[in-house]
């Protein structure tokens, strides 16, 4: 029945005991994102948040669900747990509005990440860290255009995923002639076959934009199999993509440096709690986009192995 | 005549025990499973039992529960509906597109989406009965078709993969009262979807056990040939069951759209199996003819408690599914001995 | 007055199997028509057509003088034709009384509150079965847990209870004990005396002859003729049922059995 | 020499239902033991215990002198006990010959190339059924499309073919025509003469008396006694089967039926 | 004696026609469906019939087909395996982790993952038979548990959600020859997985129709009580069927890992239903006891052709699922009349 005083110190007795840092006042942060479990992009976010937690003595609890309604429930859940801070990715601000406002009402500082920067302050978040997917897509489109490509195939591996659609839409605004293709990430054979079929069916396609490193690896093989001259660009990295960039099979990888989207909010929340600092002054803190290509791939490769790029 | 029937206790019966009577009820197993999960999380986590915590897992169970009850009825009637999951998104999309893009009042939009839902349900049922194909295949077809329509139409009309902006539509507030308001009990806000869930389960349980339609449902699921032979209107019963499922999907879709004020085109995909699972946990036989609406509602409760309980317990989310799997198996194994009893008569 | 049921040159094929061809007979009110024949002769096929489970492919089927073609057993029931099927048509997982009333449930209340009259259902079922000498422990137990004969009695009691004009019985006494078989034959006689038309299928000439008024003999899907009781003796009936000429051999064998 | 099968004070409960209590009998080689009784008396329950489908809860069960407790019908089969179940235990969707050989399939070839001997399977099945007077159009047709009596014959032919020491028949003649019933009784006599022990359940005292050597009478799960053929007349047997004292009323009824 | 049996044509039979004989085969419907889909895309698209095109859709159908055949066998045996999809990822992950992280040779890693797969399959079967719970529920448990393990273990060991780097492992080339090589036919590279698929389907078809084990499979699915009563080893048969499915998952997992050289932890989720769907399209009854391995293989082919054909037709991929749904329904409706015939005998 108590919704007034910010449940800072008294935050439920028994649970926080485990990760008690020596510095006293422990910080419990819930990170709730819209990435599906096992998604490579969000895995890096998670690694960032957990690394920050470890370094700053905060207890970080990462949860995710691609369904906006279910994501809202996870936020409610965190509010019920009276966490000390909340980090939310807002792919679908409308659906999360009530839950985030409730969290703010309950006195929990909220940092939004990734997308939704336009609504972040309105909902009462103390900061936004991210790089909207649209801007990342625009960057990729620009680069491909600069490389002299004329027709782009944008491969969406989770139909209806708003983030992936924003990436493709972004690419469309800067590149122009973009065609989308749906594949199923869980079925690598099928994904590869469909890309192969698409480049075969339309020989004009001279660039393929994958939104996930594994799809990129599949795309490289598909293009080879189809005997097409198209080149692949991708989002996110893994060792296969790193090798492919080195060998020139992949033109570049868009790097949103999402590690920071996990890491920084924990820092911000720590600062907010211990020093009432806020960051950004109502403007988003941008993390990218960065690009990994032949020029800088060697520097970045080792971090990929660790799961931080 | 009937006096002679009311004979003294039959010497062929071991003394009748309450226990034996309870044990044949299909929902008893799931009830024990639910108690187990409840006790477990109440002990290992602090917030699970707090009012806010209870409101949270009840909410999670509620929308799942509404659908699980409808799917259970359909399953008792011997059919599946794989399109049930996407239907919750389709109805929400229809409502949202009418309200935000065509500017009609939310109430009217809700009526349109209800008509749409019932039409799809009737189509499912009609196709299944008409073609004689297994409902698994037919509703798979509608599942894929709806999935494609959801995405295609949404992109066509809005250019993105979601429809938002419900908050500024006409009648949003009043319709929201019905589907998305909260009720304050002792300072905690409980979602009204919980009420819908209880109401739906109660009505379904009553219909199944107490009415003629319920009797027919069990009969067509248990043996549709025999039912037909004794004059049960098999086709009508099954079509009605499909329409009930679609109706439930409309309720859930309306709850979702009015609560979230936006809907994503790929929502609901995969949920159909959660419904089936909740129904089976609740004691329904996959082969039809046996089950209970209350059991399905409890099955959804187990799911909701386990799902949110794991979050409360702050176990590493990497292993989430592992915990969920073990939890479900444990809950279901509890009722093993009881289930067996009912299964003995299966043929 | 036209007969309750009349079939003329009726025929039915399952895929490539000709199960019934050119069979004619009548069922009059207050008379018992017995259908007799070897295994696989097409007896069940014939009554399934009469009951609306299957439709005939050839010939015509008349109920009270007007030609019909039932598209479902419901229509037959609505014309007062109740049937006991050889495979019983019970739902094993449902309780005894629910099976008893299936398709014709008694209800109380009104409008959306109309509900099953469970009390009446249970009591009538218990009484109807008790009258057949089946004293069930519990009418709530699933039919699947009953013994073969008990199940058969449930199906018979149901048909007798709901049969209005015509009662069709496909081997009703097959799984029954001596006492119960006697009760069923008494039912048949009672129904006949009440003015119902009865169609009885049996393999036991000693069951058929006493109650039958007309005997339709089938063999391998075709009719060997339809005899009135006056035209045939029980010995002749037995001989025909066992396949005519082959009787010699059979009698020899049966005698051999008794050593 | 100890009897092939002996049960002593055997009992079985389903949940709260006592289906069988304190029943004793023996089955000797070269003898037919008939189990008789009303519907629901527990006859099928008894033979299911003998066949290994269920296990007994009380008493003891001896095969050739040594106490056993079959955990599956396979074990009973391996001891040479073959059974015809009342519900036939056929798989409706499988073809006739596959059902016939199910569980004891003939094979040819060797090692990983061991395969079904389909030719032999088909021919033996066709022959075995033809001997019973069932002339099937096609042994590849699913058992589910057979008539009730044809199905019964498949189950009986199978048991006769594989019965090595003991043959158990639960109401084998229920769905059969006159001719086929005669053939089955002849089989029973033949099996007995070959030295097999036979357990026969029937509701027809005229079937039981000629072939039976010993009669076990059950009523409501309990034994009314086990009589040798010499100790009982067919009239007494019929009277017992119909429930003793109640016979008067029944005879009256049966007479009434014949008008 | 047997001479008398070989009688003249039976007068109770309409003249026997080849048509009628064909029509009762469970796979005939799917074959017609496949021809329909094939003809359709051959006409509307140019590349569908090109050697490269054929290689492409055959490849897509192959991994699906291998699993569909195994799942069909299991389904004929009356059981489901919801864990089949994730199992393909689990086996790949086990192989990859052993090979890349523990440095054992690929061949040895393959042996380990085979043992792992068979163990999980046996566990599934044992749990189902032991507890008497429906396999839908039990394998749902293992599905969730494996899904959790895949993610949890992968993250624990690698810190990322995928295991990669197979190319540099010991024995990659030779193992790749077996599972991931291509065969050049007339200038076009065909994946070896297509051979595996044909081989697997042929062996399964042979086992089902010609061997004792196949006979038992039909029997336990058609009526497990009756089968037990006549002495079929029901428990052993079902456990073997679960292990067969796991074995197929190992083959597919090995093909995937050796071809892609990396594997993502959430791979395979949701594919279990595609397997079931392919099997049902191929003529298997969901209730068990009826179906065919060849039919399931053809069901997978329909799926593969439709999926790739839509891409070749360059229809807007927003509507992809809609087309797929309509395509499947159309393909299945073709065999409607044929299927009916088999269904008549269902009880
Ligand atoms: N699985 C079961 N669960 C509960 N009760 C059962 C079960 N099987 C049988 N019974 C009961 O046990 C009693 C004995 O059944 P059983 O089948 O042995 O009778 P029967 O003598 O074979 O009768 P019939 O002549 O009709 O075949 C019956 O009253 C029946 O209702
Ligand atoms: N659904 C079906 N498909 C194919 N053939 C069938 C089907 N139903 C019955 N038959 C065949 O038709 C013939 C007649 O069957 P029917 O059941 O009418 O015989 P019946 O006279 O009732 O025999 P019984 O005395 O054994 O019950 C049988 O030979 C049977 O094999
Ligand atoms: Mg018949
Ligand atoms: Mg019996």
Image (cartoon, coloured by chain):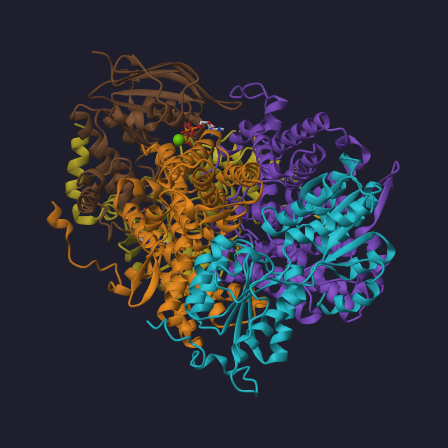
Chain colours: A cyan, B orange, C brown, D yellow, E purple
Q: Quadrant of the C terminus of chain A?
A: bottom right
Q: Quadrant of the N terminus of chain A?
A: bottom left
- Residue A143 position, x and y percent, is 78, 50
Residue placed at 76% from the left, 62% from the top? E164
Asked whether A15 or C258 is in front, the reply is A15
Residue D228 visible in the shown view: no
Residue placed at 71% from the left, 52% from the top? E252
- Residue D64 position, x and y percent, is 48, 62
The number of discs equals 0
Residue placed at 28% from the left, 50% from the top? D232
- Residue A57 position, x and y percent, is 59, 81
Residue D57, by quadrant, is: bottom left
Farthest residue, direction front = A281
Residue A194 visible in the shown view: yes
Q: Is residue B2 left or right of residue A273?
A: left
- Image: D95 above or below E268: above
Asked whether A30 or E211 is in front, the reply is A30
- Image: E177 above or below E114: above
- Residue E310 position, x and y percent, is 67, 35
Q: Is residue C70 left or right of residue A38?
A: left
Asked whether A172 or C64 is in front, the reply is A172
- Image: B309 above or below A23: above
């Amino acid at each position: 029945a108590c919704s007034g005083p910010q449940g800072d110190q008294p935050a439920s007795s028994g649970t926080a005991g485990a990760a008690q840092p020596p510095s006293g006042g422990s910080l419990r942060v819930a990170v709730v994102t819209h990435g599906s479990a096992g998604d490579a992009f969000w895995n890096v976010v998670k690694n960032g948040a957990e690394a920050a937690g470890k370094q700053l003595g905060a207890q970080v609890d990462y949860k995710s669900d691609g369904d906006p309604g279910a994501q809202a429930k996870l936020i409610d859940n965190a509010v019920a747990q009276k966490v000390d801070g909340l980090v939310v990715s807002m792919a679908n601000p409308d659906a999360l509005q009530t839950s985030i406002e409730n969290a703010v009402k309950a006195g929990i500082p909220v940092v939004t990440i990734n997308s939704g920067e336009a609504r972040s302050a309105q909902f009462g978040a103390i900061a936004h860290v991210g790089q909207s997917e649209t801007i990342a897509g625009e960057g990729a489109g620009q680069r491909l255009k600069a490389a002299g490509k004329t027709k782009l195939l944008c491969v969406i591996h989770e139909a209806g995923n708003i983030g992936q659609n924003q990436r493709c839409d972004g690419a469309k605004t800067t590149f122009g002639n973009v065609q989308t293709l749906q594949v199923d990430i869980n079925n690598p054979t099928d994904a590869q076959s469909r890309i192969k079929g698409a480049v075969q069916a339309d020989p004009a396609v001279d660039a393929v934009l994958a939104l996930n490193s594994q799809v990129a690896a599949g795309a490289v093989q598909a293009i080879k199999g189809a005997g097409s001259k198209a080149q692949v660009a991708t989002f996110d990295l893994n060792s296969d993509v790193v090798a492919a960039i080195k060998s020139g099979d992949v033109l570049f990888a868009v790097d949103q440096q999402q590690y920071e989207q996990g890491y920084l909010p924990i820092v911000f929340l720590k600062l907010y709690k211990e020093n009432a600092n806020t960051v950004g002054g109502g403007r988003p803190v941008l993390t990218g986009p960065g690009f990994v290509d032949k020029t800088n791939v060697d520097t970045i490769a080792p971090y990929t192995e660790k799961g931080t790029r | 005549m009937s006096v002679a029937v009311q004979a003294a206790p039959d010497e062929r019966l071991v003394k009748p025990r309450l226990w034996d009577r309870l044990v044949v009820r299909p929902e008893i197993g799931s009830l024990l499973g639910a108690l187990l999960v409840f006790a477990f999380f109440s002990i290992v986590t602090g917030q699970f039992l707090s009012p806010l915590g209870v409101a949270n897992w009840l909410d999670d169970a509620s929308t799942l529960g509404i659908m699980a009850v409808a799917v259970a009825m359909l399953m008792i009637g011997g059919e599946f509906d794989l399109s049930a999951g996407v239907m919750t998104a389709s109805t929400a999309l229809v409502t949202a597109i009418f309200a935000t893009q065509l500017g009609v009042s939310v109430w009217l939009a809700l009526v349109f989406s209800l008509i749409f839902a019932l039409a799809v349900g009737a189509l499912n049922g009609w196709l299944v009965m008409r073609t004689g194909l297994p409902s698994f295949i037919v509703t798979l077809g509608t599942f894929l078709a709806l999935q494609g329509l959801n995405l295609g139409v949404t992109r066509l009309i809005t250019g993105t993969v979601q429809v938002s902006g419900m908050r500024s539509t006409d009648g949003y507030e009043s319709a929201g009262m019905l589907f998305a308001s909260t009720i304050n009990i002792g300072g905690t806000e409980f979602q009204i979807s919980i009420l819908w869930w209880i109401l739906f389960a109660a009505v379904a349980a009553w219909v199944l056990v107490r009415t003629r339609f319920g009797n027919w449902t069990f009969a067509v699921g248990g043996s549709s040939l025999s039912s037909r032979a004794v004059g049960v209107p098999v086709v009508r019963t099954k079509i009605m069951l499909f329409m009930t499922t679609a109706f439930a999907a409309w309720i859930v879709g309306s709850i979702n759209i009015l609560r979230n004020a936006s809907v994503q085109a790929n929502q609901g995909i995969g949920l159909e199996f959660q419904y089936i699972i909740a129904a089976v946990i609740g004691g329904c036989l996959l082969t039809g003819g046996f089950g209970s609406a209350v059991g399905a509602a409890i099955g959804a409760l187990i799911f909701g408690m386990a799902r949110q309980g794991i979050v409360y317990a702050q176990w590493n989310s990497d292993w989430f599914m592992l915990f969920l799997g073990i939890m479900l198996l444990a809950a279901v194994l509890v009722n093993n001995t009881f289930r067996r009893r009912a299964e003995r008569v299966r043929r | 007055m036209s007969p309750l049921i009349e079939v003329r040159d009726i025929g039915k094929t399952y895929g490539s199997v000709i199960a019934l061809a050119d069979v004619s007979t009548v069922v009059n009110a207050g008379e018992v028509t017995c259908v007799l024949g070897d295994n696989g002769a097409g007896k069940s096929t014939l009554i399934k057509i009469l009951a609306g489970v299957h439709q005939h492919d050839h010939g015509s089927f008349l109920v009270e003088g007007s030609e019909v073609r039932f598209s479902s057993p419901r229509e037959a029931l609505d014309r007062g034709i109740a049937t006991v099927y050889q495979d019983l048509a019970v739902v094993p997982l449902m309780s005894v009384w629910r099976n008893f009333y299936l398709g014709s449930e008694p209800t109380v209340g009104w409008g959306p509150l109309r509900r099953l009259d469970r009390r009446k259902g249970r009591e009538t079922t218990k009484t109807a079965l008790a009258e057949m000498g089946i004293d069930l422990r519990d009418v709530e137990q699933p039919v699947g847990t009953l013994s073969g004969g008990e199940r058969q009695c449930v199906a018979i009691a149901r048909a007798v209870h709901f049969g209005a004009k015509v009662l069709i019985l496909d081997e009703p006494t097959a799984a029954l004990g001596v006492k119960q078989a006697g009760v069923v034959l008494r039912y048949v006689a009672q129904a006949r005396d009440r003015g119902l038309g009865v169609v009885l299928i049996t393999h036991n000439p000693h069951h058929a002859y006493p109650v039958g008024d007309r005997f339709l003999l089938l063999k391998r899907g075709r009719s060997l003729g339809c005899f009135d009781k006056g035209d045939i003796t029980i010995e002749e009936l037995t001989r025909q049922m066992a396949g005519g000429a082959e009787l010699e051999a059979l009698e020899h064998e049966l005698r051999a059995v008794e050593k």
